[in-house]
Image (cartoon, rainbow, N blue to C red):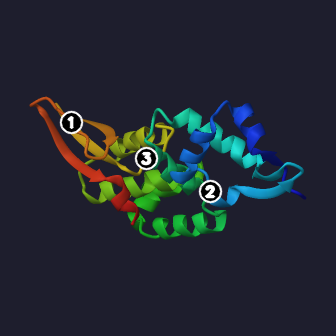
């Protein structure tokens, strides 16, 4: 089946963006080069795009451009473009690193209860935390819910686990962000999330 195309002129009008924005996003690798398709028309050469892909991509850019930097957004969106077979292999290699105990207690239920990418993201982090022996099983379950319910899979960020009056709490911050904690709060774990996936 032929892929439905949309011209550059139609795209700019439909999405309410400028020529400059479109090419800035291209330079930042938010829009793949191979989506720019040159075709001859009665007015000369014109750029076209795969309609469904480009409209979804621009919608995502507009939705998240105030939440992430363009570099971070490019990383997130390009992960989504990874071929499914390749993503499957990557996920399987990450799952193989999980300890047997983690798989039995948390991992299998995680994979059965959530979309695979979300389950693997949370599982890689939880497996590392479990190996540190700093949280109880019930606290690991709380951390699982925290990671899953965030709605976005942040890699270029740091996870902190803290205790105050015996209670554990968690937060994720942008890499190299400054944090200030009360004197009676103790950080018991911190990691740059991206390093766990290498």
Residue 16 sits in quarter:
top right
Q: Quadrant of the N terminus?
A: bottom right
Task: Compare marks 1 and 3 and give the one earlier in the sequence.
Answer: 3
Q: CA distance from mark 1 to mark 2?
A: 36 Å
Image mark count: 3
Q: Which residue is mark 1?
A: 179
Q: Residues within 10 Å of mark 1 (few under 14, many from 20)?
A: few
**Does residue 114 show up?**
no
Q: Which residue is mark 2?
A: 32
Which residue is nearer to you in this view: 94 or 101?
Answer: 94
Q: Position of residue 96 (x, y in %)?
A: 47, 70
Q: Position of residue 69 (x, y in %)?
A: 43, 42
Q: Position of residue 87 (x, y in %)?
A: 58, 64
SS at badge 3: loop
Could you tell whether 125 is left or right of 25 in the image?
A: left
| Foreground tag (1 vs 2) | 2
């Amino acid at each position: 089946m032929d892929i439905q195309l949309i011209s550059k002129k139609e795209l700019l009008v439909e999405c309410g963006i400028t020529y400059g924005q479109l090419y800035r996003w291209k330079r930042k690798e938010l829009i793949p080069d191979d989506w720019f398709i040159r075709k001859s028309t009665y007015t000369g050469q014109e750029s076209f795009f795969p309609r469904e892909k480009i409209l979804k991509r621009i919608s995502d850019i507009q939705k998240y451009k105030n939440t992430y930097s363009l570099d971070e957004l490019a990383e997130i969106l390009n992960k989504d473009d990874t071929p499914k077979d390749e993503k499957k292999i990557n996920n399987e290699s990450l799952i193989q690193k999980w300890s047997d105990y983690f798989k039995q207690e948390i991992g299998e239920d995680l994979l059965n209860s959530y979309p695979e990418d979300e389950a693997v993201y949370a599982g890689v982090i939880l497996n590392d935390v479990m190996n540190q022996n700093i949280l109880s099983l019930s606290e690991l379950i709380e951390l699982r819910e925290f990671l899953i319910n965030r709605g976005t899979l942040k890699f270029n960020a740091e996870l902190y686990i803290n205790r105050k009056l015996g209670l554990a709490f968690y937060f994720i911050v942008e890499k190299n962000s400054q944090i200030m904690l009360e004197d009676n709060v103790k950080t018991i774990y911190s990691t740059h999330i991206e390093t766990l996936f290498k």
